[in-house]
Image (cartoon, rainbow, N blue to C red):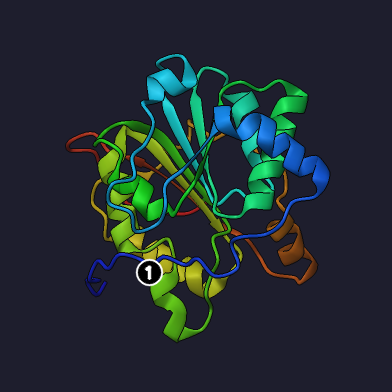
Amino acid sequence: MTAQTPRRPVAVTVGRRGTLSPALQDVWDRLWPQLGHRIVEGDPEGTLPDLAQWFGREAPLVLDIGFGNGAATLSLAEQLPDHNVIGVERYKPGLAQLLQSLGERGVANVRLLRTDATGLLDRLAPGSVAMVRVLFPDPWPKTRHHKRRLVNLWTVSQIAERLCVGGVLHVATDDANYAEAIAGSLADEPRLVALPAERSVPSRPTTAFEARAQRAGRSVTEFVVSKRTTGSGHEPGND
């Protein structure tokens, strides 16, 4: 396989504002100050909250990056009540919808970050994350836009650095070209290996993007890999 040159993805901010209905604005005003935090993209002074203080406890950390309306994040948090889950999203209506669901269901182990995911990775300590999930990131299908794709060799390397030993990276895409590129990035990262068959990741509801892909007849490719212990063997693969 030809070696890739790690390149930081170009941050994308276009179309990420959105407006809220009066009901969602009320949810935002009530819950965002407690459960949400924003790091302005490109601001080197922007910092994460102290996570133990923010969550009110010490627990294994899970990142759910680009969660859309948050239904899958809510399911993940309910399945992992002993984990701290950070949902990462730029789109304000999606953040507000998840805030609303968290309030309605009484789920207490989720916090939300409005930021670019690559900037978040810069701010996390090595070995501090138990799981990273990226479901259906924008495939940016035109070749000239591939530099904007979130999951590339640079991002995979950054995630591998921040996963604890045995930590899991789970990626799904319905774009065949993107799936091929992701497979190449995983194969070029020696710290990641296919998740052993006896282990599994939390189940998830069908996302809106996945349902759209199914209606269009596109197949979904999922990659589930874990951070190897020193001297472990097999290579990354996909489900």
Q: Residues within 10 Å of mark 1 (few under 14, many from 20)?
A: some
| Image: 206 above or below 214 | above
| Image: 149 above or below 28 | below
Looking at the rendered structure, the secondary structure element under dot 1 is: loop
Residue 235: in sight, yes or no? yes
**Residue 103 rendering spot, x and y as whole percentages:** 72, 26
What residue appears at the point 58 percent right and 58 percent down from the top-left corner?
Answer: 136
Residue that label 1 marks: 10
Question: What residue occupies the far top of the structure in this picture?
Answer: 57
Observer-nearest residue: 234 or 178?
178
What residue appears at the point 76 percent right and 72 percent down from the top-left corner?
Answer: 216
**Residue 159 rendering spot, x and y as whole percentages:** 33, 47
**Residue 164 rendering spot, x and y as whole percentages:** 30, 32
Amino acid type of the residue that numbered disc 1 sits on in the rendered structure: Val
Name the quarter where the N terminus is drawn. Answer: bottom left
What residue appears at the point 49 percent right and 70 percent down from the top-left corner?
Answer: 178
Observer-nearest residue: 99 or 107?
99
Q: Is residue 89 left or right of residue 235?
A: right
How many numbered marks appear? 1
